[in-house]
C-alpha cells in the first residue's frame, strides 16, 4: 500500500495506518435491515464487485442492469449490496489487494448508483412520513453511509435532507425554512466528536419550542452513554432498523415532558393567585 507515502511521513506502519483509516472511513456505513425480506447472497455480491472493479463505465445503469439480471431491484442493490461492497473494498484495501485509486473510483461509482436510485425513488414514491435532517460532522471523510441512510428513510416514507459539515449560518437558514421532525448527526471517528457536539447544540437552539428529536450515531468507538452525554443528543442510534421505535419513544417522551411542564406552570399560577391554599 504505497499510494502517497503518508504512513511513513507520520511515523506509522503503512498497514496499520491504512487499516485504521479504512475502519474510520468505510466502517461508518449504517447497519442495514432486511429490505422486504431480501438476503444478501455472496455469489451476487462477488459478481457485483467484479463488475464494479472491472468496468470503466461510471454509469450507474450498468451496475443496476447487471443486478437486475439476477432479479434484484434497485432499492435492494443500493441498500444491501452497496454497503456490503464498500466494506469489502475497505477490507481489500487494508489487505493491500487493491489500490487507493481503485477504492476511490469504485466509491464514486457507488455514490452515483445510490444517487440514481434516490432519483428513481423520488419519482415513484412521494414522502408521506416524518421529515429527517441528516448531518455529517466535520472531519468525516466519506458520505456514502449518509446517502444510503437517507435512501432507506425515503423507502420507509420519510422525507430526508443530507448536509455535510454545514456552517451554522447555513443550518440556521435550512431549519428556518423547513420543518424537521428529527435530526440525525453522523460521527464516525473521535476527531469529529467536537463537530458533532457543536451540530447538536446548534440544532437544539434552532429547534427550541419545536418537537424535533435529535439523534447521534455512527461507528465512533465511544460507548452510547458517553456519546449521548458528550453530545447532548436525545438518543444514540447505531442501527437504522431501530429508528422508528426510537423516534416514537423520543417523541412520546417530549410530549409527556411538555404536558408535565404545563401542569407545573398551572400549579404555580394557582398558588400565586392563592387558589387551593389553606387559610
Image (cartoon, rainbow, N blue to C red):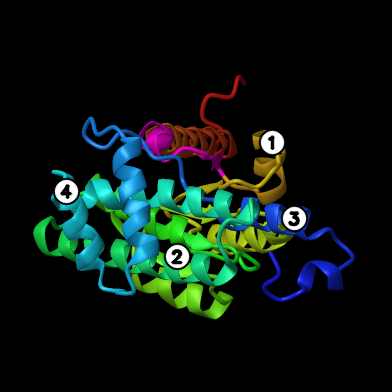
Q: State the residue in front, 146 or 242.
A: 146
Mark closer to the chain start, 2 or 4: 4
For the record, the magenta segment spans 234-246
Q: Which residue is mark 2?
A: 107
User: What is the tally of numbered marks visible in this picture?
Assistant: 4
**Is the C-beta separation of discs 1 and 4 under 8 Å?**
no
Mark closer to the chain start, 3 or 4: 3
Q: Which residue is mark 3?
A: 15
In the image, which disc is placed on residue 223? 1
Mark closer to the chain start, 1 or 2: 2
Q: Which residue is mark 4?
A: 73
- Marks 3 and 2, Cα distance to the nearest angstrom? 20 Å
Residue at 43% of width from left, 65% of height from top?
106
Quarter placement of the N terminus: bottom right
- Marks 2 and 4, Cα distance to the nearest angstrom? 20 Å
**Is the C-beta separation of discs 2 and 4 under 8 Å?**
no
- Marks 1 and 2, Cα distance to the nearest angstrom? 29 Å
- Using the rendered image of the protein, determine whether residue 80 is visible from the camera's viewpoint: no
SS at badge 3: helix
Amino acid at each position: 500500500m504505497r499510494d502517497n507515502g503518508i504512513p511513513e511521513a507520520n511515523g506509522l506502519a503503512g498497514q496499520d495506518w491504512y487499516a485504521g483509516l479504512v475502519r474510520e472511513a468505510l466502517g461508518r456505513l449504517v447497519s442495514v435491515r432486511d429490505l422486504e425480506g431480501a438476503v444478501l447472497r455472496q455469489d451476487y455480491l462477488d459478481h457485483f464487485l467484479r463488475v464494479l472493479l472491472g468496468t470503466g463505465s461510471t454509469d450507474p445503469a450498468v451496475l443496476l442492469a447487471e443486478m437486475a439480471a439476477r432479479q434484484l431491484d434497485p432499492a435492494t442493490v443500493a441498500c444491501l449490496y452497496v454497503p456490503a461492497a464498500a466494506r469489502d473494498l475497505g477490507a481489500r484495501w487494508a489487505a493491500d489487494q487493491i489500490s487507493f485509486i481503485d477504492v476511490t473510483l469504485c466509491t464514486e461509482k457507488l455514490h452515483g448508483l445510490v444517487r440514481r436510485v434516490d432519483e428513481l425513488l423520488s419519482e415513484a414514491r412521494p414522502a408521506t412520513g416524518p421529515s429527517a435532517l441528516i448531518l455529517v460532522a466535520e472531519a468525516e471523510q466519506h458520505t456514502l453511509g449518509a446517502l444510503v441512510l437517507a435512501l432507506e428513510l425515503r423507502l420507509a416514507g420519510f422525507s430526508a435532507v443530507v448536509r455535510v459539515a454545514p456552517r451554522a449560518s447555513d443550518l440556521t437558514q435550512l431549519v428556518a425554512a423547513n420543518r424537521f421532525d428529527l435530526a440525525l448527526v453522523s460521527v464516525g471517528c473521535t476527531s469529529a466528536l467536537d463537530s458533532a457536539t457543536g451540530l447538536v447544540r446548534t440544532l437544539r437552539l434552532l429547534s427550541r419550542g419545536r418537537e424535533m428529536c435529535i439523534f447521534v450515531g455512527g461507528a465512533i468507538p465511544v460507548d452510547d452513554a458517553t456519546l449521548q452525554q458528550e453530545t447532548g443528543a436525545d438518543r444514540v442510534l447505531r442501527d437504522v432498523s431501530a429508528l422508528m421505535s426510537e423516534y416514537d419513544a423520543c417523541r412520546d417522551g417530549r410530549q409527556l415532558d411538555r404536558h408535565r411542564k404545563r401542569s407545573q406552570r398551572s400549579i404555580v399560577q394557582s398558588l400565586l393567585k392563592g387558589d387551593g391554599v389553606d387559610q
